[in-house]
Image: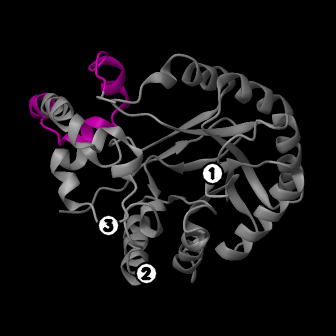
């Protein structure tokens, strides 16, 4: 049987076109246990691209830096011309804590670093990974606008931004995409952020639609976690005291997916299912 190719969609209203399904590359290098073997990850990326998944997502924070280097290696020898590269800036570690930064000098330095690590002259979609609330968003977007004018960035995105921040940023330069967690049990964005993006013609990139792997494997996923997997520490859904509650939610998804004759992960990716079928679905936090 011939493999089914992933379709294409317009992301936002400024002309960016990407594969309808993207490949988040963070877990290849960071946070979900030890970094995976480079040769295996390059093979995975090439398989994704051959299948039509050409929208590749990374960040200078993943590693840090090593995930961008991995994508730079994987997209050599003509692969770059077949993909849309998205990367991010704006998260730093200081004194053992995570902070957001968005001042112009930092924005420019981050862009230059990402260009070098990715081995490209231009980034297709450049996100502000987290919003620096110590200065107006207009200042950060103003510098990103200059990078677009210089040809170093094609399109601008925001990650985890409020509706009011999105509006203010969009007034300085068109925002093509907003990245946020949107899954069966992460629904708060539907109140203000999703309607704002639709009003302004901004694309939505929903990361972790499978609940960071939970809807792909269910409660058994925890047994496969390796040492250093941040999900056990950072996300209450994976903690033992919440697992029985969330197991029932997974069973609910399984029952419905059986009726629809699809895998639970397919159901979880379906925005229509999130909106219409599970209005009361909430994880135990």
Viewed as shown, does residue 194 lie left or right of 105? left
Q: Is residue 80 highlighted in magenta?
A: no
Residue 98, numbered label: 1
Q: Which residue is mark 3?
A: 227
Image coordinates of residue 276 in percent, x first then y, are 32, 17
The CA span between labels 3 and 2 is: 19 Å
Of the numbered discs 3 and 1, the one sitting upstream in the chain is 1
Image coordinates of residue 182 in percent, x first then y, are 44, 34
Quarter of the image holding residue 92? bottom right
Residue 254, numbered label: none
Viewed as shown, does residue 73 lie left or right of 242? right
Quarter of the image holding residue 151? bottom right
Q: Secondary structure at mark 3?
A: loop
Q: Nearer the viewer, mark 2 or mark 1?
A: 1
Residue for point 57% across, 83% down: 77
Q: Secondary structure at mark 2?
A: helix
Residue 184 versus residue 111 in the image, above or below:
above
Q: Is residue 153 visible?
A: yes
Q: Nearer the viewer, mark 3 or mark 2?
A: 3
The magenta-colored residue range is: 254-282
Quarter of the image holding residue 196? top right
């Amino acid at each position: 049987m011939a493999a089914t190719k992933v379709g294409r969609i317009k992301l936002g209203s400024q002309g960016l076109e990407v594969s309808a399904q993207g490949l988040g590359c963070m877990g290849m290098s960071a946070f979900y246990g030890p970094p995976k073997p480079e040769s295996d990850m390059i093979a995975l990326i090439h398989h994704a691209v051959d299948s039509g998944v050409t929208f590749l997502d990374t960040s200078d924070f993943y590693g840090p830096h090593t995930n961008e280097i991995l994508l730079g290696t994987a997209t050599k020898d003509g692969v770059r011309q077949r993909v849309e590269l998205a990367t991010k800036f704006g998260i730093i570690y200081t004194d053992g804590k995570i902070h957001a930064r968005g001042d112009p000098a930092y924005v420019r330095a981050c862009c230059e670093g990402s260009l070098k690590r990715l081995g490209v002259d231009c980034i297709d979609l450049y996100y502000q990974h987290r919003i620096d609330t110590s200065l107006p968003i207009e200042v950060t977007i103003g510098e990103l606008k200059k990078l677009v004018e210089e040809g170093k960035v094609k399109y601008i995105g925001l990650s985890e931004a409020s509706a009011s921040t999105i509006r203010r940023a969009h007034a300085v330069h068109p925002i093509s995409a907003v990245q946020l967690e949107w899954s069966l049990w992460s629904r708060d964005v539907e109140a203000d952020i999703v309607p704002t993006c639709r009003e302004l013609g901004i694309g939505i990139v929903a990361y972790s639609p499978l609940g960071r792997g939970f809807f792909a494997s269910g409660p058994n996923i925890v047994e496969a976690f390796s040492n250093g997997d941040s999900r056990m520490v950072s996300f209450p859904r994976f903690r033992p005291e919440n697992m029985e509650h969330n197991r029932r939610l997974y069973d609910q998804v399984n029952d419905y997916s059986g009726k629809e004759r699809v895998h639970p992960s397919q159901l979880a990716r379906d925005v229509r299912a999130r909106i219409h079928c599970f209005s009361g679905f909430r994880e135990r936090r």
